[in-house]
Amino acid sequence: MEHPHKGRMTRDGIRIHEDGDFVGMHAAGELAATILDKVAPHVVPGTTTEKLDQLITDMVEAAGAKSATIGYKGYKHASCISVNHVVCHGIPGPKTLKDGDILNVDVTVIVDGWFGDTSRMYVAGKPNRKAERLIQVTHDALFKGIEQVKPGNTFGDIGYAIQKYVESNRMSVVRDFCGHGLGRVFHAPPNVLHYGRPGTNAILEEGMFFTIEPMVNLGRPETKVLADDWTAVTRDKSLSAQFEHSVGVTSDGVEIFTLSPSDMYHPTYL
Ligand code: MF3
Ligand code: CO
Ligand code: CO
């Protein structure tokens, strides 16, 4: 057996990891976050999303790590890059970015068998005021969710905090995609919904690892997937934003595995 599975599983099939497993998640998360830091100066009008993806491919390789997305369900790239009204799973391509475009870059790497999954928003040039507000609200919504992460709270508490914050800002939370458990696997139970009611769904326990990755639309929440079978867009063509962190539940709260080592995560960095 290559990886004897220590730890246990809850009734909902959520793995409870051991203390030492946090070390592996930190290494994977730090690489993913460092890669996103290094992407930032390259996001300029005139570049293409496939150039950004090539940079990411090179950085994963230079780190001696593996991309979790290349070969995943037939996906061929080291990142998803979702521009403007693309909600998630945008495929890198030859389209050039223009001034004011907003984009999410989502990277998942495997380091020593552990998965680090994170995404954040960038702007090519200068965002307009609405786009900037969308990015800020989405970022802050993720942290409203993260604030709920501690033993005894529920996944419904996380979703409720995110939904309440987003809707109080007159924006909408995407229902068609969710966060997920991860660890030595990319996607595991539970589905981490970004909406919901307090006190519902599974109870958080120390040793659970999962992502929180809210997608927020300026318009309506509905999405559709394009004919390429990946690209998800807003049905009403409104702008969409997303931030994602991989986190672990500790004895009294949360550890974020994918914090930016250069503190470049917050959108006001832009
Ligand atoms: N990183 C995405 C997530 O947050 C998954 C991308 S799968 C891919 O779960 F195949 F589209 F890359
Ligand atoms: Co994810
Ligand atoms: Co991701």
Image (cartoon, grey):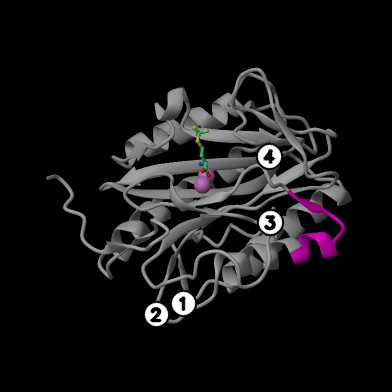
Q: Of residues 237 and 60, which is closer to you in this image? A: 237
Q: CA distance from mark 3 to mark 2?
A: 30 Å
Q: Earlier in the sequence, mark 3 or mark 4?
A: 4
N-term-proximal mark, 1 vs 4: 4
Query: Does label 2 point to a residue whose CB lies under 8 Å from ligand 2?
Result: no
* For the residues bearing labels 3 and 2, Cβ distance under 8 angstroms: no
Marked residue nearer the N-terminal end (3 or 2): 2
- Distance from disc 1 to disc 3, alpha carbons, whole Å, reads 29 Å
> Callout 2: 10 Å neighbours few (<14), some, many (20+)?
few
**Residue placed most toward the observer, 238 or 51:** 238
CB atoms of marks 1 and 2 within 8 Å: yes
Q: Residue at x 44, y 82 (%)?
A: 252
Q: Check the image and report above or below for 163 versus 228.
A: below
Amino acid under disc 4: Leu
Q: x and y percent of residue 23 in the render?
A: 30, 63
Does any atom of ligand 3 lie closer than 8 Å to the CB of label 3? Answer: no
Residue type highlighted by circle 2: Ser
Q: Which residue is mark 2?
A: 251
Sequence-first disc among 1 and 3: 1
Does residue 66 sit above or below 146 in this rendering?
above
Which residue reaches farthest left? 1
Q: Is residue 168 magenta?
A: yes
Distance in Å between CA atoms under marks 3 and 4 = 12 Å
Q: Pointer 1: what residue?
A: 151
Disc 3 designates what residue? 267
> Which element carries disc 3, helix, strand or loop?
helix
Foreground label between 2 and 4? 2
